[in-house]
Amino acid sequence: MADTMERWAVQYQKLALNVRDERLRRFYQQGLPGVETPLTDVSFVALDFETTGLDAEHDEIISIGLVPFDLNRIRLRDSRYWLLKPRRELTETSVPFHGITHSQLNDAPDLNQILDEVLDEIAGKIVVVHYRYIEREFFDAAVKRRLGEGICFPVVDTMEQEAMLYRRGIVSRVKRLAGLKPESIRLGDSRLRYNLPHYGQHHALTDAVATAELLQAQIRHRYSETTPISDLWI
């Protein structure tokens, strides 16, 4: 993982010199923690999106929840939540899923109007998500549609942490051969394995808090405070 971190650091330096948008330049100039930074010294920020669908190239982000935290504390007082007006209408299937309606979004801002704030909240921190292909790909696609250039950043993926235990390796192969159903690595089911409380799902801020708590539990069970961040980074 250390090589991955070093590649990200080099990429950030190049992007800071080459991006056209000043907001993105400031984001990349904040840099990343060093590869040997122990987890106890890392500032994390959990990030979650609700979207109009599952296709990052065509669907839009309609809410963002984020919460800063570290190994010992989740800073709910500093959490942020935005509703966003999409450029594509909500579908009949997406509204029951996340509960966000057209009327709630009528006066919501476009992502471009709050992009400064979002970037300021995540710059220089380790972004934590549950399933990186939503937050990373949707954010990149949404920024690209608005600025003509996208955004990239490494993450710690709590779903990936669960997949390493329950979807890969010899135990998982034996279970498949025995015809046993694989363990769920969805956010709520993953939390149950650590005796974390049940939260309602598909609200961006609630899911961000749930993801932060899940990573704290994963680290306590599998790593130590002195583990370098490069062991978790993707």
Image: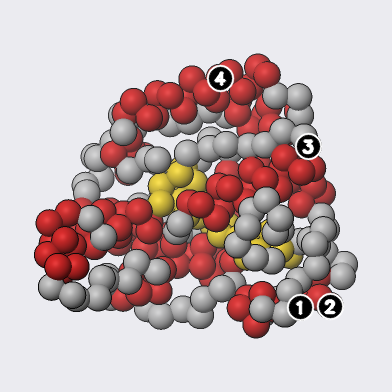
Q: Which residue is mark 1?
A: 101
Q: Viewer-proximal residue, 82 or 131?
A: 131
- Mark nearest the camera among 1 and 4 is 1
Q: Viewer-proximal residue, 171 or 132?
A: 171
What separation in Å lies between label 3 and label 4 (alpha carbons)?
20 Å
What separation in Å lies between label 1 and label 3 (alpha carbons)?
27 Å
Does residue 14 appear left or right of residue 21 in this picture?
A: left
Placement of the N terminus among the 4 image quadrants? top left
What separation in Å lies between label 2 and label 1 (alpha carbons)?
5 Å
What's the residue at 59%, 72% (across, down)? 203
In the image, residue 146 lies at what x, y percent?
A: 79, 42
Q: Which residue is mark 2?
A: 103
| Crowdedness near tag 2: few (<14), some (14–19) or many (≥20) residues, C-alpha within 10 Å | few
In the image, residue 40 lies at what x, y percent?
A: 32, 43
Q: The disc labelled 3 sits on which kind of residue?
A: Leu
Q: Which residue is mark 4?
A: 13
Asked whether residue 65 is in view, the answer is: no
Q: Which residue is mark 3?
A: 147
- Looking at marks 1 and 4 on the same chain, the residue that comes earlier in the sequence is marked by 4
What separation in Å lies between label 2 and label 3 (alpha carbons)?
27 Å
